[in-house]
Image: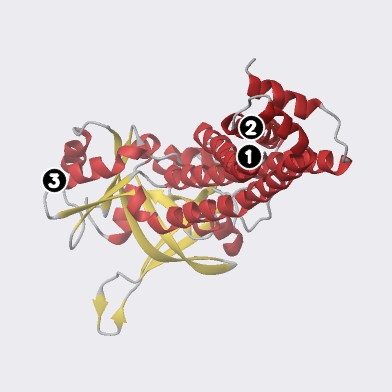
Amino acid sequence: MNFEWFVCRRYLQAKRRQGFISLISFISVAGVAIGVMALIIVLAVMTGFTNELRSKILGINAHIIVQKYGGQIDNYQKTAAEIRRIPGVKATTPYIFTQVMITSDRGGTGAILRGIDPNSAAQALRLGKYIKGCKLQDLTGPAGGQPGRRLPGIILGSDLARQLRVYHNDKVRLMSNSGPLTPIGILPRIKTCRVLGIFKSGMYEYDSAMAFVSLATAQNFLKLGKKVNGIEVRLNDIYQARNISLEIQKRLGLNYISRDWMQMNKNLFSALELEKTALAIIVALVVIVAAFNIVSTLIMVVMEKSKDIAILKAMGATAAQIRKVFIYEGLVIGLTGTICGLIGGITACRLLARYHFIKLPDVYPISTLPVELNSGDIIMISVGAIIITLLATLYPSWQAARID
């Protein structure tokens, strides 16, 4: 053990003549620990919330949407096959998207009608895990227990079904203003469907407005023939969406537009990232306050040990060695607090993730507090706390080195 560590250890183990200094040292360790622990929990919750929200959005929607300028896609099978030849593309599915009025015997409301191909949608989307009462494939044929069903099936968002006050096997009517023009005005298109199941994602904007029918039903209702509004694309790696979207645009030409999930949800995820950064800065102030406690502690130790420092210098200790003694002492306080904070923060996050004992109100799209530890965040917090602690030791150690 070198000289500096030996003296540092003796100072840390020795009983203070002023008990107040020991109390301040304990408060400094506790402050660093609480700050590190709070930072880990806050960043883990924000990371979990962002990832959970992304998972829900990308479960309902694909990673890339391809549309045609000025209208529908005619030969969508050929276009989809061209897209699937691009490396990194996992699956494609056509879709029809339109605004309609949905009515029942008990009420009516506006909604978004989404026509999907159940077979390809099962590969390109993750809708199945949000649907209760039926399977996605039931949209194209008689549902279980309903042999020979003649009415086309429809799956309603949970809040939309609640507004209409309809249940499984009830009838609803779709109305669209895209009907033919007559001398008395535009005649609405009307189609009756039977409710097969309920869609519940936990996100109000989807659950309150989304209704799903088969692609053939939507094409027949809107008189589109074999046309579709666009093609949804699922990728092997969601973070390659930007590059693959550009490649799709390049292959299909200027008549098509390709947009990835990051472009379509840019404002939402930018706001979440900004909120995460702001919270991290605010909570980091706890660590900075603890650093000031370390400064106070070391200054008081320097004042208490001024005679000892003078004796050490008389025995040949250099100013650099004295400086290192107090830097090491401050680092020990900071490291102790950081390690305690890491243990506390990681333990708290694991408990929250496992037992979900914090429930969120219904206004949030997630029922329990999502927690996801990120090794990069943990390393950044640990290194940041140690650097702040190191900076806090510079002035007291400089003062100690000046004592003669």
Mark 3 and mark 1 lie on one chain; the one further toward the N terminus is: 3
- The residue carrying mark 2 is 322
Measuring from the top left, give residue 197's x and y in whole percent.
54, 46
Q: Amino acid at mark 3?
A: Lys
In 3D space, how far apart are the residues under numbered discs 2 and 3 (Cα atoms)? 66 Å
* Disc 3: which residue: 250
> Which residue position holds label 1?
397
For label 2, count other residues whose C-alpha is less than 10 Å away and answer few (under 14), some (14-19) or many (20+).
many
Q: State whether residue 16 is above or below residue 303.
A: above
- Quadrant assignment for the N terminus: top right
Q: Are marks 2 and 1 in contact (CB under 8 Å)?
A: yes
Query: Counting residues from the N terminus, which is met first, the one under dot 2 or under dot 1?
Result: 2
How far from the left and from the top, in percent, is residue 73? 19, 52
52 left or right, relative to 118: right
Between the residue at mark 3 and the residue at mark 1, the CA separation in whole angstroms equals 62 Å
Q: Nearer the viewer, residue 187 or 349?
A: 349
Q: As shown in the figure, which amino acid type bears the numbered disc 2?
A: Ile
